[in-house]
Image (cartoon, rainbow, N blue to C red):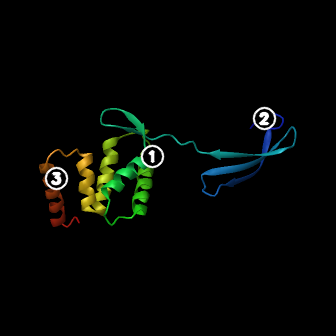
Amino acid sequence: MKCPYCGETEDKVIDSRQGKEADVIRRRRECLSCSRRFTTYEKVEDMPLVIIKKDGRREVFNGEKVRAGMLRACEKRNISVHVIDEFIEQLERDLRETGEKEVPSHQVGEAIMNKLHELDDVAYVRFASVYREFKHVNDFISELKYLLKQQQKGGK
C-alpha cells in the first residue's frame, strides 16, 4: 500500500479489525520508510446484478423498484412493510447466490408472485394483473379460478 505521507510502498499491518457491519476490514499500517501510521479499509467489491428485461434491455437490479411494485400491490392490505423489505433483501441474496451476473426478469417476477401468493391473494392478483399484463376480465377470472383451486387443495 502506498504511504500517503512519503509515497513508499513498503509497510506492515499493525492491526486488523472488522467493521461494525462485518462488511469492511479496517487495517492500521505503518510505513517502513517514514514510520508514520495510516489506516486503510478493505471491502468486497459489489458486482452489479443485471436484470434482463422482456425486450432484451438490461438494467441493474433495483430493490426500490421491486419495493414500489409490491407496495402498490399490497396497498390497503394487512402486510407489513418490514415483511416486504425482508423479502427483497432475501430475493437479492438468492439471486446473487446463483452466481449469475445476469438474471431474466421473469425469474424476479415469479419470485415476487410466489411471495405475494403466500402473503395475500388480493395482493397477488393485483401484482399478477400488471406483471402478466391482463388485458381482459377473463384473465382475472382465470387467475381467480387458479387461486380457488389452490385453496381447495389446501394450498392456502
Q: Which residue position holds label 3? A: 140
Q: Toward the viewer: 96 or 84?
A: 84
Residue 2 position in % (x across, y down):
76, 36
Rendered-image quadrant of the C terminus: bottom left
Tell me residue 32's x, y (percent): 84, 40
Q: Nearer the viewer, mark 2 or mark 3?
A: 3
16 or 20, which is in the foreground?
20
Q: Quadrant of residue 153?
A: bottom left
Residue visible at 43% across and 62% down in the picture: 82
Give the labeled residue for mark 1.
96
Question: Measured along the vertical axis of the image, is residue 26 above or below residue 80?
Answer: above
Identify the disc placed on residue 47. none
Label 3 crowd bin: few (<14), some (14–19), many (20+), radius 10 Å: some
Q: Is residue 45 left or right of residue 50?
A: right
* Residue bearing mark 2: 9
Q: Earlier in the sequence, mark 3 or mark 1?
A: 1
Check disc 3 and give the amino acid type: Phe
In what element is the residue under mark 1?
helix
Report, in whole angstroms, how far the alpha carbon at label 2 lies from the one at label 1: 35 Å
Asked if residue 22 lies left or right of residue 125, the reply is: right
Viewer-nearest of discs 3 and 1: 3
Picture quadrant of residue 6 = top right
Could you tell me how far apart the alpha carbons at marks 3 and 1 are, in whole angstroms?
33 Å
SS class of the residue under badge 3? helix
Q: How many numbered marks are there?
A: 3
Amino acid type assigned to the residue bearing label 1 in the image: Arg
